[in-house]
Amino acid sequence: LPGMRLPQSGKQMLKSLVAALLVLTVHSAHADLQKENLLIEIPKDYKLGFETKRENMIIAEYVPIDQDVSNWSDMLTAQIFLGLKPPSVKAFQAVGQGMLVKSCQDAKFMDIWQGQENGYAALVWIQLCPHNEKTKRMELTYLKAIQGNDSLYLVQKAFKVDPPKEDQLKWVNFLKTVLVCDTRASEHPCPKM
């Protein structure tokens, strides 16, 4: 993608899911997991800036401690689309990309990796919006989608500034650590701590 530096390598359910999003910064939280869970360890220098649960979605937004969700330059977002089962993670990606193109005509996309993780289909990609019509700023986002049996999970790291190459690599590696597990299924084991 022109001008972009890329890394070289490419309520019960609600209670459980919120625990996975918010409590997993503490390693011992794994012992409390039930059913299907998004496993994401929020960096220590990030704080929860916003969270909500809608009819079919849970979202949590984290920003560096010195930033605010209303005025951020980089943000980590975890979303759980409850009950969503698209034909594939690529189909989910295509819908999201179509929505981005509406607000950013010059949007560019590139897949980094697609395959199976912990028995689930997963996809990691990058998208660049050189000039978002809403924010009037550039936005570079690294995304990871995982199709669970119960829901679809999306974690994204967005920048409104051009991050250094080492930060880009750091966040691609971070996305590699994001997993979904299911305490009910041996083919999707949750880690033992």
Image (cartoon, rainbow, N blue to C red):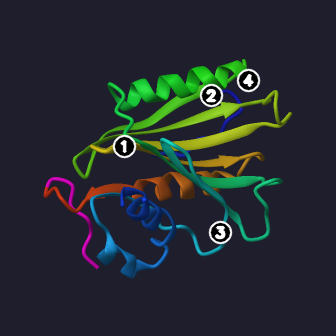
First in residue order: circle 4 vs circle 3 = 3
N-terminal-most mark, 3 or 2: 2
Which is more foreground, mark 1 or mark 4?
1
Is label 2 or label 4 in front? 4
- Which residue: 81% across, 53% down? 70
Q: Are marks 1 and 3 in contact (CB under 8 Å)?
A: no
Q: Which residues are magenta?
A: 187-193
Type of amino acid at the residue the image marks with label 4: Ser
Extreme residue in the right direction: 136
Say which label, 2 or 4, has the lower sequence index.
2
Of 125 and 11, nearer the camera is 11
Q: Is residue 123 visible?
A: yes
The circle on residue 1 is 2
Q: Residue at point 62% right, 23% down?
A: 99
Q: Which residue is mark 1?
A: 151
Q: Residue tagged by mark 3?
A: 46
Quarter containing the N terminus: top right
Q: Residue 79 colored magenta?
A: no
Dominant SS type (magenta): loop
Query: Residue at the location (83% across, 36% down)?
Result: 135
Disc 1 crowd rating (10 Å Cα; few below 14, some 14-19, many 20+) is many
Which residue is labeled 4 in the image?
103
Amino acid at circle 2: Leu
Please tell me in which quadrant of the rendered image residue 121 appears.
top left
CB atoms at circles 3 and 2 under 8 Å apart? no
